[in-house]
Amino acid sequence: MRIVVTGASGQLGSYLIGRLVEGPHEIVGWSGRATEERAGLPLLPVDLTDLHAAARALENADPDVVIHAAAVSSTDAAHRDPARSEAVNVRATQFLSEWTAQHDRRLVFTSTDLVFDGSKGWYREDDPANPILVYGHTKHVAERSVLAAPRGLVVRLSLLYGPSRSGRQAYFDCTTAALRAGISQTFLADEYRTPLDYDTASEILVRLAESDRSGLMHAGGPERLSRFELMCRAASALGIDPLLVKPNSRADIPFAEPRPPDLSLDSSRLHQLMPDIRCPRVEDALASIR
């Protein structure tokens, strides 16, 4: 198969490219940045907000599958610039949905647990979405266009963690570097997700891209954890003093938007489809980088 990966220079995209280049498929990676490479694969700069340029790039690539991982994925960035978030997260996804539907190709779209309001937790695919953040709203609107495509698959991912492979330090890298330097860090103790490591998330997405699955799927980790619990366990797994990890609360921070308290995902549908997929606990996911 020929697979196009959008957002290939990002955190998740870099893991996807690293996994895909080891397999049998022909891979085309798109980056919104200047020409880069990942895992030895040159990436093509494609501006997804320029739909004419995106159309030309699709015609040139002629993919069997598009894994659409590009997004304005920072909740703060989406709130600050809702127009760009709309252009990237919604309109570009709608365009890709229409193109893949017209050409009978598969589209795998990475969405988020932030399409929920966090009022109950352990969300299943049939629970109604009710986003309260700008970012979650754009993703939920984009989901509809993917689900309208006959071969479209929406994969809602939970909080992703792990070291960066993009060549740029991300939140996890910055916080663990500070902890290694003996600088204490604070993390929310009253906001819950089902964290999943990047490597496993990339495996799940590739396996789903290779399947004929369509519709909606949740992909979260095996445990409901706060960021504080996640980073305590990450610190221990990395040989860092966990006492440097300090708790705080949503009430301590003046967020620009309300924060969903419990976004834990029920991923039983995924495990029924792929019972051999192993979603590791934090300690096992990080053991190889200690």
Image: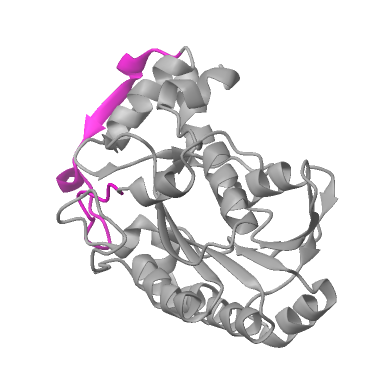
Query: At 33% across and 59% down in the image, what residue appears?
Result: 114
- Count of numbered marks: 0
* Colour convention: one colour
What is the chief secondary structure element of the magenta stretch? Answer: loop
Query: At 67% across and 47% down in the image, what residue appears?
Result: 14
Is the residue 158 above or below the residue 88 in the image? above
Is the residue 54 above or below the residue 171 in the image? below
Quadrant location of the N terminus? bottom right
The region drawn magenta spans 240-265
Tell me, yes or no, if residue 267 can be seen here.
Answer: no
Residue 39 place in picture, x, y as percent: 78, 42
Quadrant location of the C terminus? top right
Is the residue 14 above or below the residue 280 in the image? below
Query: At 21% across and 55% down in the image, what residue appears?
Result: 118
Is the residue 113 above or below the residue 18 in the image? below
Front one among 227 and 150:
150
Query: At 15% across and 53% down in the image, what residue appears?
Result: 120
Is residue 21 found left or right of 198 in the rendered image? right
Tell me, yes or no, if residue 244 can be seen here.
Answer: yes
Residue 145 place in picture, x, y as percent: 47, 80
Front one among 252 and 222:
222
Is residue 107 found left or right of 193 in the rendered image? right
Residue 29 place in picture, x, y as percent: 75, 59
Is residue 144 located in the magenta-colored stretch of the structure? no
Is residue 249 located in the magenta-colored stretch of the structure? yes
Front one among 63 and 87:
63
Is residue 69 found left or right of 215 in the rendered image? right
Residue 33 place in picture, x, y as percent: 71, 62
